[in-house]
Amino acid sequence: MKLKTTLNGHTYEFKNIIDVMSKSNEPKSADRYQGMQAESVTERIAAKIVLSHLTVADLTENPTIPYEKDEVTRVNIDGLSLPIYRKFAGMKIGELREWILSHKTKEADLIRASRAFTGEVVAAVAKICSAYDLVYGANKIHHVTRCRTEIGQKGTLSVRAQTNSPTDDVKSIVAGIMEAVSYGSGDACFGINPVENSADGTTRIAEGLFEFMTKNSIPTQITVLSHITTQMKAMKQGAPLSMLFNSIGGTQACNEDFGINKELIQEAYQVASEYGNGTGPNLLYFETGQGSEVSIGADCGVDEMTLEARTYGFARYFNPFIVNNVTGFIGPETIYDGKEMIRGNLEDHFMGKLIGLPMGIAPCYTAHAKIDQEDQEMATMLLALAGANYYMGVPTGDDVMLSYQDTSFHDDATMRELLGKKPAPEFFKWCIDRGILDEDGSLTDMAGDGSIFLR
C-alpha cells in the first residue's frame, strides 16, 4: 500500500491506515480531542487522495482493529459474501465512489454489493464524498424490512412514536401515543425509553401500548428500550413486545460496556422468534451514533466515523428491522456544533445504507452542544431528501425524559408533505380508514387531536 502523496510541493506520509482514515475526516471534535485530526486543510486533502487510491482489499485485509483481537472486526468480515467481495476487492476507493454515484449503477446493484464491504470500506468512501454525494448516494438505496408490518418501501417515510415519561407513567405515555398516531406517526413502532430497567416496568409499559394498539387495530410494532436482557426476561414472562432493542458500538470493548456480544444478540433473536408478537423475519432494533466509543474510552485509537461504520457492519450480521442513528446526542466532546452534526448524520445514513441497513435517523442535539433548532431542521430536511427510512416522533420535539431535542410529530408530517411521501402501506391504509389522512397523504382536520381515541 502506498501511504504518501505530494501536494503543493510537500510530501505527506501517513503512518498506517488508521492515520489515513482519521486525517481524511471532515472536522469533528472527537478527532481533535484524540489528537488525530489533520493539522491543515491541505493535509486533509492529501489524506483523502491517499485514501482514494487504496483498494477495497487493502482496507478489508488490514482492518483498523485486528481480526483476532476484536469481535466487531470478526463480525464485519464474517458477514461478507466472498464471491461478491472478490468482484470489488481490486477496486480503488475513488473508483468505488464513482461507481456508487453513477447513473448506470442501479439500486439492485448497490443492494447486492452491500455484502462486499466492511465498515472500513464504507467509511473510506464516505470520507471522500461531499454532502451532495452523501445525499444522492443514499437516496438510491431502499432496504425493506418486516416485523409485524413492513417499512422502508420507496416513497414512504416512517416514524417511531417516542412519548417517554420521566416517571414511566403508562397513562401519560399512552396519551402521548394517541397524539402521535393522530398525526400519522407510529408506523415504524411505538418505542418507549423507560426510566426503570426492570422486567416488570418493561412489561407494564408494553401492556399499556399493546392494549391501545389492539383496541384500535393499529398495524405497527412495540418496543420498550430497557437493556436487551431485561426485555428478553420480560418477553419470556409474556410481555407483548414485537422486537428486541439494544445500543451497539464499533469495538468489542464498547459492546462489552453496553453489556452485549454476538452470542447474546443471536440468543435475543431466538427469544423474539419464540416469545415475541413480531412475525419477522426482522426482529431486532439497534441504536448507534458517532462518538459512543471515545466517550467511554473504548475507541482503540480509531476515529469515531470509522468506528460508527464498523458498528453498521456488526448490525448487518443480525438482519435488523430498524437501525437508528443518534449522532449529536452525546454532546460537544464528540460532535461540537451544527455543521459537524449535519455532516455526521449524512455520513452515517449513507454508510449504513451502503453496508445494507434500514437506516433511521434522529438528527438530535442536547442543550450543552453548540447546535440549535435551525441546524436540526436543516439536517432533517437533507436526510429526508437522502431517503431516511424513518424519524423519531417526540412530543413538541422535546423529550422530557432524555432531555434532548429531536423531530416532532408535526416535523415528520411536514417532511412527508414536502417530499410527497406516505407512511408504511398498512399503516397508511389504517390512517385513511380512521379519517386521519386523506388518500393523497395529507393530514385531515382530525390531525393532532389525540382525544379521537377516547370518544
Image (cartoon, rainbow, N blue to C red):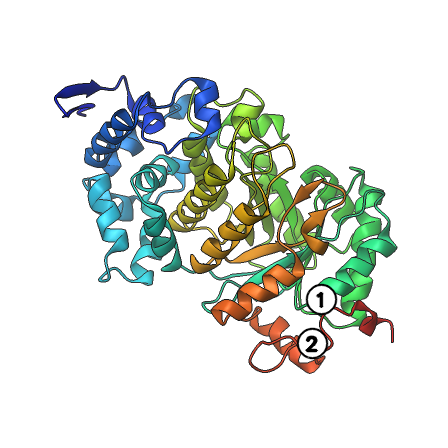
At 65% from the left and 80% from the top, the residue drawn is 432
Q: Disc 1 marks which amino acid?
A: Val
Spatial CA distance of label 2 from label 1 is 8 Å
Q: Is residue 279 visible?
A: no
Identify residue for label 2. Answer: 436
Above or below, 372 relative to 171: above
Image quarter of residue 417: bottom right
327 with respect to 231 (left or right): left
Q: Position of residue 113 (x, y in %)?
A: 31, 51
Nearer to the camera, 298 or 42 = 42
Q: Position of residue 111 (x, y in %)?
A: 36, 56
Nearer to the camera, 439 or 29 = 29
- Disc 1 element: helix
184 with respect to 306 (left or right): right
* Marks 2 and 1 in Cβ contact (< 8 Å): yes
At 20% from the left and 20% from the top, the residue drawn is 12
Mark 1 surroundings: few (<14), some (14-19) or many (≥20) residues within 10 A: many
Q: Which mark is residue 181?
A: 1
Q: Position of residue 201 (x, y in %)?
A: 83, 44
Nearer to the camera, 337 or 432 = 337
Name the N-terminal-most of marks 2 and 1: 1
Q: Is residue 76 visible?
A: yes
